[in-house]
Image: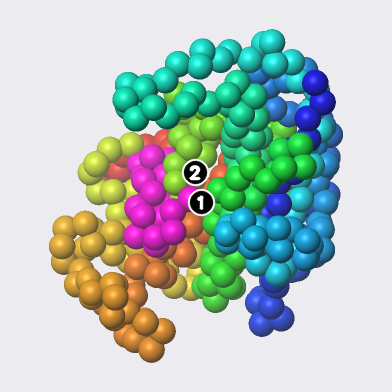
Amino acid sequence: MKNIIEIYLPIVNDYNREDYSFEQKNIIINELSIIFKRKPFAVPKYIIDYNIIITRDSYDEKIYEFLRKKNVIPLSKEENLKFKIELATDLDFFDYDGLQSEKEIEFQIPAVPREVSFSYELIEFFSQNLFETLILSQISRPGSLKLRNGIAFFDKKYFSSEIKSPSHFRYILEYRNIINYPEIQFLDFSNFYLWLKKSNSIFPISPSNGIQRTLNNLTYVFTEKNEISEFLYQLRILEDLYTNSNIQVTEQLNEKIQLFLGEMITFKKQIKKMYAIRSDFLHGRMLLEPIHKINEDNFDKIESFKLYDATQLSFLLVVSTVQKMYELDLVDLIFETKIKIN
């Protein structure tokens, strides 16, 4: 059979006030295209062949009106990053049992037809792999894509409005420009992706090294919409990579991060402050204001505002560490222990 999946992810508009290199958007889209031409995904046996074409599409009024009539929240009136996936498939290889749960039988809910289940599995497979690839792209070229969750069509028919896109962290790069640390690069994504493939590091179920564990943790960072959760996952990554015991964790992080990423010339105490904020939050020493009373007018004056800077710094440290591990071809960080004898 021949099938077509079309996935639309709205591209958030850029603003002149953003301190960012806007040409990175076109560069990363071109690099994504190169990767997709290599057909990088290991497909199930019912997919005989596939081809992914990625384009920047102008806003389509027809799609907007179509979704509005279906009472689906439409795409915002922005450009879309469109993924057109051309498929050759064989339904005979699709494992379908048609079994219903006890509740479905009790409430006389009909079984999902084989063809519907097949289309769902195809969209789920490709949307998941695209989501993973977009996460990796934002480690390679941070902030290059600002996307919203999107929609999918299957064989030209509307199918889903629940296609996830990873969170973007472009604003954090502006914080990096303030503290001038750590080094953040724009890496060639096609080479970065090949390196991850070579080391079997693209989101394994059972991670066995530092890069694998880091990327698995980052799936939560790029999915969470809560700064506290992001912060804790990022600290979890840094502790995993840079510490070898629960003793003097602050000192280990402060010393080893600067040993690997370079010394902080200004804001020298920021790493220690970052970990102190983590401890104060987890052990109840940080006051939390009622979330419904936090707004733009008081955000920078409240106690929990400390979390904001710490979250930004921890994200920068994670991205910089992964980038340098790629440059040095390291999947784990190993530090020698020196014993001083007086």
- Identify the residue under disc 1: 222
Instruction: Describe residue 10's horizontal placement relative to residue 98 as left or right.
Output: right
Residue 65 on image: x %, y %: 71, 63
Crowding around mark 2 (Cα neighbors within 10 Å: few <14, some 14 to 19, many 20+) is: some
Residue 266 on image: x %, y %: 48, 73
User: Is residue 53 visible from the viewing direction of this image?
Assistant: yes
Work out whether residue 259 or residue 74 is closer to the camera in this orientation and state it.
74
- Identify the residue under disc 2: 219
Look at the magenta stretch and give its main secondary structure. helix
Q: How many marks?
A: 2
Work out whether residue 94 or residue 332 is closer to the camera in this orientation and state it.
94
Classify residue 231 by image quadrant: bottom left
Q: Assign a secondary structure to mark 1.
A: loop
* Residue 239 lies in the magenta-colored region: yes
Give the residue displayed 64% in from the left and 62% down from the top. 68
Classify residue 149 by image quadrant: bottom right
Instruction: Describe residue 202's horizontal placement relative to residue 43 as left or right.
Output: left
Q: Assign a secondary structure to mark 2.
A: helix
Which kind of residue does numbered mark 1 sit on?
Phe
Q: Are marks 1 and 2 in contact (CB under 8 Å)?
A: yes
Write down the region rendered in magenta: 222-243
Q: Residue placed farthest to the bottom in the image? A: 297
Give the residue displayed 71% in from the left and 38% down from the top. 154
User: Quarter of the image containing the N terminus?
Assistant: top right
Give the residue displayed 36% in from the left and 22% down from the top. 105
Q: Residue placed farthest to the front in the image? A: 108
Work out whether residue 221 or residue 276 is closer to the camera in this orientation and state it.
221
User: Is residue 24 visible from the viewing direction of this image?
Assistant: no
